[in-house]
Amino acid sequence: GWHEEQGEDILGLVEKAGQKLVLEKAARDAAGAAALPLSRRLRKLEQLLAKLDEEEQRLLGMCAAREDGLLLQAWLWRWPADFRAPELVLPPPDEGDGDTPRKTVKLDMRRSVRDNMERLFHTARRGQRGLEHLAERRAVLRAELATVQAARQEALLGGIGHAAGEAGKPDRNTVALGALRGAALPRNVQLFVSDDGFALLRGRDAKGNIAARKLAAAHDIWLHTDGGPGSHVIIRRAHAGQEVPERTLDQAGALAACKSWQKDAARARILYAEVRHIRSMRGAGTGTVRMDKILYSREVPVDASLETRLLPESPAGKTDGTGRD
């Protein structure tokens, strides 16, 4: 692919010859550097998922204690209330004392057989609850893993501009709707897209605030108007290390203010926190939460026109007035 070219401008010719060798390598190096934080997060997520696999085996072992508890329960009538033993060899509950295979149940000598039985049931219940929490955690990690993998691939290919057709500017619908990871958007949650291409979710009411938070990942940004009632807004992020531009922070804050007690004000104070630090409050009203850690607060202009301008576009290029694509 090389050809010979002659001229008086030696430096210009050398630069032209070096473009193929140097500039392409520089672009690859820059893409690799941009993808490095994502690669580190990818490894961390894989390690966390591997630990969850180990934890799952431990919890399954705890759940298996229920079988021993049921076996003790079936034969509990045999022993007095204070009977203790290091172990018991028991047949299946429905087999009687024939020649059927028996199972050895290890016991704690400090407790009676009945207490051991109750402890086995308690251990099994803890294991089951642990598996339920583990499944939720695994789903969150796998979802983040998929988005980080996609973001890393985009970085290695030179950024999101390659897919969007315009360097540095993401396609608003593709990025925002893709960030929802295929989740169906409830009717009480509105979708907006910031000018920087970030998906913004806003609850239409108290139940919508809860639904929006359920669609969020732990690393997403949650925000709310300070000092009074209002809708919750979520800024979706591809991964925990992704920076959110100030313009998106202000636009999301304005959307929160437009559906709050500050909707008629010129400016409003907005509180921002990661979703991982937002907790529902028991006994409080629906959608009421507490913030364990605030990222920052910002005063933003209240711009009602954003409620229409930031709606996602339909495939035909027209705005969807419902807030849902």
Image (spheres, rainbow, N blue to C red):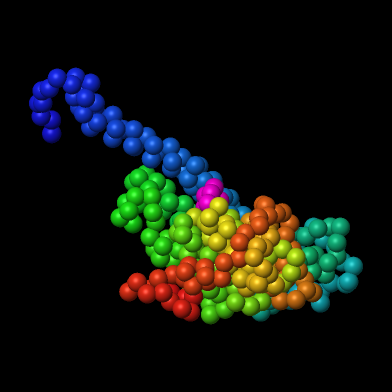
Which residue is at the front of the view, 95 or 143? 143
Residue 281 vs 3, above or below: the answer is below
- Mainly helix, strand or loop, the magenta region? loop
Q: In percent of the image, x 66 and y 76: which residue is there? A: 206
Q: In percent of the image, x 33 and y 37: which residue is there? A: 27
Q: Would you say residue 275 is visible in this rendering?
A: no
Q: Would you say residue 157 is visible in this rendering?
A: yes
* Bounds of the magenta segment: 239-245
Q: Residue furthest right?
A: 82
Quadrant for the N terminus, please. top left
Q: In percent of the image, x 57 and y 62: which residue is there? A: 252
| Number of marks in picture | 0
Q: In percent of the image, x 58 and y 58: which residue is there? A: 250
Where residue 3 appears, as percent x and y from the top left, is 10, 29
Which residue is at the front of the view, 38 or 189? 189
Left or right side of 117 for 311: left
Where residue 194 appears, as percent x and y from the top left, is 49, 61
User: Does the magenta-highlighted stretch encompass residue 242?
Assistant: yes
Q: Quadrant of residue 272?
A: bottom right
User: Does the magenta-highlighted stretch encompass residue 291?
Assistant: no
Q: Residue furthest front?
A: 266
Where residue 94 appears, as percent x and y from the top left, is 66, 79
